[in-house]
Amino acid sequence: MTNRTLTALAIRIAGIFLLTKIFDHFGSYFFSIYSAAIMAKFDELLKEPTNKFYFTGTFLTIANIVVSLFLFIKADWISKKLIKSDKEIVTELNPKSLTKIILLTVGIIWLAISIYLFPDFIKCCVEMISKLNGNENTKLPDFPLAKYVLKIILGLLLIFRIEKISNWIVKKI
């Protein structure tokens, strides 16, 4: 297995994670439409127009589908753009290679989870912008924004600086 093949595999797994997020969002979106349809005074209670509410949910569902299919179908192309030199992965088990495997796995999992949570991140940003624009009725979602950004940064750092980090860890051992 080469590093390009492993990257393509990780990108496909991230696409599958995002595809499962579609079902979560899809269910809550249609439940909210059903709840809105049974409420008699929904227009009076809701301060924002209902068209914006339906457009945001529909847009996020379509964006989930498009991004997950793109990641799943174009994983080889993305890995060719990310990985310039294709090297064979050596599987000898020593402290240095074991730390590389652990750090790389953690980095890939964190990036896959961040891709999975990308629609929630977009929704949080939309709500935050709405709140900053003076909409008093907007409630900020319970989304750990700092943790999300930190995991993306650390995941990329672990993947792209794996050699220096593993050398430092082996030296400390």
Image (cartoon, rainbow, N blue to C red):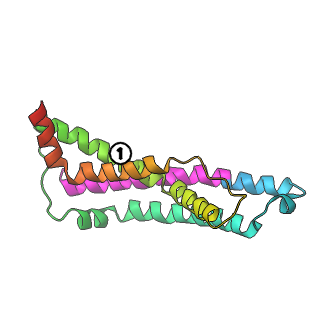
Residue visible at 35% across and 65% down in the picture: 74
Q: Position of residue 161 (x, y in %)?
A: 19, 51
Label 1 secondary element: helix
- Above or below residue 145? Residue 60 is below
Task: Say whether residue 162 is magenta.
Answer: no
Residue 77 as seen in the image, left or right of residue 92: right
Residue 106 as seen in the image, left or right of residue 68: left
Residue visible at 70% across and 55% down in the picture: 30
- Above or below residue 102? Residue 52 is below
Residue visible at 46% across and 63% down in the picture: 67
Q: Which residues are magenta?
A: 1-28
Q: Position of residue 138 (x, y in %)?
A: 68, 57
Label 1 belongs to which residue? 109
Q: Position of residue 158 (x, y in %)?
A: 25, 48
Residue visible at 37% across and 48% down in the picture: 151
Task: Say whether residue 7 is magenta.
Answer: yes
Q: Is residue 33 visible?
A: yes
Q: Quadrant of the C terminus?
A: top left
Q: Position of residue 157 (x, y in %)?
A: 26, 52
